[in-house]
Amino acid sequence: MVIKKKSRLENARNAFEKKDISATKLAHTKGAIKRHFHNEDTISEREKYVSEFIYGAVDGTVTTFAVVAGATGAALDPVVVIILGFANLIADGFSMACGNFLSEKTQIDYIKRERNREEWEIENAREGEVEEVREIYRKKGFKGKDLDRAVTIITSDKKTWLDTMMADELGLLESPKSPLLTAAATFVGFVTIGIIPLSAYLLATFVPFFSQNTFAIACLLTFFGLIIVGIIKSQVNRTSILRSTIETVFIGGAAAVLAYLVGYLLRFIVGV
């Protein structure tokens, strides 16, 4: 079995959580820093998109269970619950994925357009752009010869110059994420976790015990699903597992209760 060596970034995060000064210093040696900034120790592809997976998973679980709870509150047939649940699962999941794709793509296009504009201004209004760099570093506290040296160094390399203008003037950083993979992570999270509330109704067609206690089992399965999402979320955010779990379960539970009450009241209003 191959044991993957922890990255410098992961070691630094763990050291911070434990407030371990010695481990923090080890993560900040010259060798470790050099490896990190030479792309030998960067954030993995999985880490880039796990937030989108969680976003989709939470929304998928909450909205799908809300449909199940509302339909159950209205005393609809289990077959109808399954149809409504799957319709929501696929349609809403796809809608969220498309929204994420368009959002990420729009941001990338906007940053690209602004970078092209800055590049054009450097080529056609060089003196003004040099003065902008001077003002940026003056605000950072550079003065006199140090300021002149900083401006000279930055403007001597076009890429560095462009990066400086994008980050310090416009506050724009290029995203390492792919719009397509962002959308895929959202959809996968939505569907894989969002199907949990429906699983009790699917199993009810084969197992008598599930058919007799369908909604109660759906509530229990959703509860455990939200706990799993809360645990994953805590690992990403590096926060307390208990706090993250309680927060996730509370939000999901509140949405479910509201949906159930709406369905229950509508049952009497429309005379079902």
Image (tube, rainbow, N blue to C red):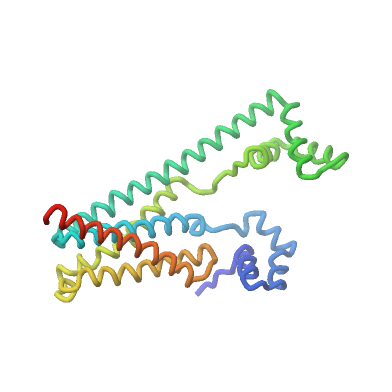
Q: Is residue 218 above or below residue 151?
A: below
Give left or right: position of 69 versus 170: left
Query: In the rendering, at what x and y percent does residue 251 appear?
Result: 39, 62
- Number of marks in picture: 0
Give left or right: position of 234 versus 272: right
Q: Is residue 45 above or below residue 95?
A: below
Outermost residue toward the top? Answer: 124
Outermost residue toward the left? Answer: 271
Query: In the rendering, at what x and y percent does residue 190 appear?
Result: 35, 56
Residue 238 sits in quarter: bottom right
Give left or right: position of 136 versus 109: right
Give left or right: position of 37 versus 99: right
Q: Residue at x 73, y 27 (%)?
A: 128
Query: In the rendering, at what x and y percent does residue 215 appear?
Result: 22, 68
Outermost residue toward the front? Answer: 269
Residue 86 sits in quarter: bottom left
Tell me if residue 117 can be seen.
yes
Q: Quadrant of the C terminus?
A: bottom left
Q: Residue at x 42, y 41 (%)?
A: 102
